[in-house]
Amino acid sequence: MAVVAIRIKIMPESLDVSLPDLQEKIREKVSKSGAMNVSFSEENVAFGLKALIIQLAWPEEKDTNSLETDLSEMEGVSSAQIIDYRRAFG
């Protein structure tokens, strides 16, 4: 079974969205979906707005479109976009 390394950029709806709370909700959602080694970083966008960058290991045979859609439909999320997809090993 091959594993891919994925980076996803999450844009919050506004400055009022708590990024630590959003991280916990995202971690719970992706872990239930099969993600492993989930980590987060923040990226400055503009005027104090920060994007969350999620890095995770994902089974290659699982669909990433549903992952991206599920994340973009979460409360507090404006958009979710896969910005990097690489075969990790396998």
Image: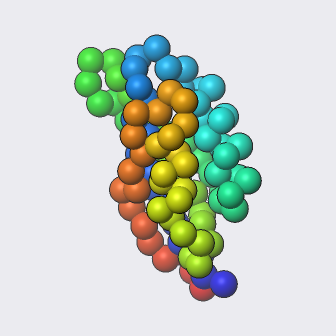
Residue at 42% in and 67% down: 85
Does residue 7 lie above or below 46 as drawn? Answer: below
Q: Is residue 65 left or right of residue 38?
A: left
In front here: 29 or 69? 69
Q: Is residue 78 left or right of residue 23?
A: left
Q: Is residue 84 above or below residue 73?
A: below
> Whole-percent x and y of residue 16?
46, 14
63 relative to 2, above or below? above
Please tell me which residue is depicted at 55% across the width and 37% down the height of the picture.
Answer: 74
Q: Give the left or right position of residue 23, taking residue 52 as reference.
A: right
Residue 51 appears in view: no
Query: Which residue lies most toward the top here?
Result: 16
Name the residue nearer the viewer: 86 or 81: 81
State how many labels appear.
0
View extreme (left): residue: 46
Q: Nearer the viewer, residue 30 or 74?
A: 74
Residue at the (29%, 30%) spot, across then down: 45
Residue 2 position, x and y percent, is 60, 81
Q: How is the image coloured?
A: rainbow
Q: At x 64% / y 51%, what residue is drawn?
A: 30
The quarter of the rendered structure image containing the C terminus is bottom right
Quadrant position of residue 46: top left
Q: Position of residue 57 (x, y in %)?
A: 60, 64
Quarter of image, res 89: bottom right
- Quarter of the figure that contains the N terminus: bottom right
